[in-house]
Image (tube, rainbow, N blue to C red):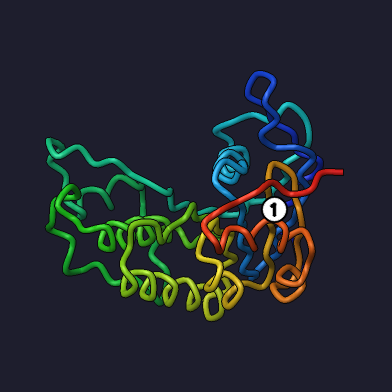
Amino acid sequence: MSHLLNISKLNFSFEQNHVIKDVSLTVQEGKFVTLIGPNGAGKSTLLRLILGTLKPQSGKIEWAENVRIGYVPQKVHIDITLPMTVRRFMELKPAPDLMSLPVVSIDHLMDKQLHSLSGGELQRVLLYYALLGNPKILILDEPMQGLDINGETEIFTYLQHLNKEEKVAVFMVSHDLHTVFKESDQVICINHHICCHGHPTEVQSSKEYLDLFAPYHHRHTKDCHHE
């Protein structure tokens, strides 16, 4: 099975603050990989490094040749004064090439203004937009944030179909630990460095994960143990 993404000894700092420290990971073709960690752990910064909007101080980020990437951001602010329909938004991506079996239906939203969409509707639109061009890997930054339980279920149903049936690799940041361990092939726990990683059952039973997330279930967090 080939690697779509390979990261080796990645480091990034804001001034003297080490946000990403010696991070190495891979995402294989067709796998569902989830990144977890407390607030401020560097998850979104890592995504920005992967997507090339930040430049690491050291380390390597290597993509498979000609890999197609789809991206769904955590938040998109839509100005209420911006007159743009969903249809016009879709036309912004040149020469869209829809997947042969699109699983995200937005036909009923096409003539709506972007700023009028609900949270679930907007996430559906952003996911659909990310799928234009048939990506081999889909990168999502907390796509369930702000959604109700029905919206979360719908988005996860889409992702599972894309991953299992269309063989699209998924690399997702999430705080929903219950769903993470149920749906993922691999879980990576990060708190500036990688605390633990592997199959969900391995991560759940690891001391590093328990040290980090057992207090979280009581509405507290604490740092991972550093060497």
Q: How far across and how far down the image is residue 55, in percent?
A: 64, 29
Front residue of 29/150: it is: 150
Front residue of 226/64: it is: 226
Quadrant of residue 181 in the image? Answer: bottom right
Q: How far across and how far down the image is residue 221, in percent?
A: 60, 51
Quadrant of residue 147 in the image? Answer: bottom left
At 43% from the left and 77% from the top, the residue drawn is: 157
At 60% from the left and 65% from the top, the residue drawn is: 169
Q: How far across and how far down the image is residue 11, in percent?
A: 74, 33
Which residue corresponds to mark 1? 5
Q: Amino acid at mark 1?
A: Leu
Which residue reaches farthest top?
A: 15
| Quarter that holds the C terminus | top right
Which residue reaches farthest bottom?
A: 165
Q: Is residue 104 above or below residue 132?
A: below
Q: Is residue 60 above or below residue 89?
A: above
Callout 1: few (<14), some (14-19), or many (20+) C-alpha neighbours within 10 Å? some
Front residue of 196/85: it is: 196
At 38% from the left and 70% from the top, the residue drawn is: 152
Q: Is residue 16 above or below residue 178?
A: above
At 66% from the left and 34% from the top, the residue drawn is: 19
Q: Is residue 71 above or below residue 109?
A: above
